[in-house]
Image (cartoon, grey):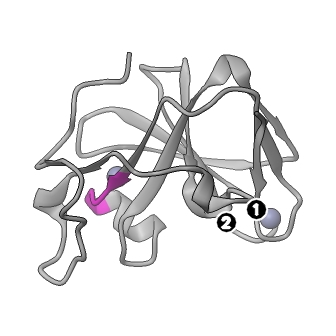
Amino acid sequence: MTIEGGCLCKAVRYSSSAQPVITRVCWCRTCQYVAAGNATVNVFFRTESFTVQGETRDYASVADSGNIIHRRFCPQCGTPLFTGAEARPHVIGVRAGTLDDPNSVQPAMTIWTDSAPRWACIAESIPRVARQPPPLA
Ligand SMILES: [Zn+2]
Ligand SMILES: [Zn+2]
């Protein structure tokens, strides 16, 4: 089954021929900027089964985890699309809001809950990790 998505203006489109490795909710301080005050929801795919069409811009920064993270967005409409750690090029994180069908995924874990504001809504039904979880295999 192919999973597809793209940015708001449709200048960038992507598809994965494989199911995601995991979907995680992230409350790290940087994600709160990207997600307008909320957590990001990130769907991790293997890059070997993932293709992107269209131009993205890239902002690299050092995350709370100490990893250098590249955040790619559409230069036309500004939609945050992808995230990836330099140390782990075999996986790409996709912002769940850009999926054609956000119901096609299900978050399995909430991470960086220590950085969440007091008013954050955090799911009771899935595991929480206070800071950075172990890297994806
Ligand atoms: Zn766009
Ligand atoms: Zn984060």
Q: Is residue 59 magenta?
A: no
Q: CA distance from mark 2 to mark 1?
A: 6 Å
Does label 2 point to a residue whose CB lies under 8 Å from ligand 1?
yes
Q: Is residue 27 magenta?
A: yes
The residue depicted at 22 percent of the width and 58 percent of the height is 125
Does label 1 point to a residue whose CB lies under 8 Å from ligand 1?
yes
| Residue 119 screen position, x and y as percent | 18, 84
Cβ atoms under marks 2 and 1 closer than 8 Å: yes
For this view, does 80 lie left or right of residue 9? left
Identify the residue position indicated by label 1 in the image: 7
The residue depicted at 47 percent of the width and 49 percent of the height is 42
| Residue 111 screen position, x and y as percent | 24, 49
Q: Which residues are magenta?
A: 25-29
Q: Quadrant of residue 52?
A: top right
Q: Amino acid at mark 2?
A: Thr
Determine the secondary structure under disc 2. loop
> In which quadrant is the C terminus drawn?
top left
Identify the residue position indicated by label 2 in the image: 79
For this view, does 78 lie left or right of residue 135? right
93 shown above or below 73 = above
Q: Quadrant of residue 68?
A: top left
Determine the secondary structure under disc 1. loop
| Residue 90 screen position, x and y as percent | 55, 18
| Residue 82 screen position, x and y as percent | 60, 46
Q: Nearer the viewer, residue 127 or 88?
A: 127
> In which quadrant is the N terminus drawn?
top right
Q: Amino acid at mark 1?
A: Cys
Most distant residue in the bottom direction: 119
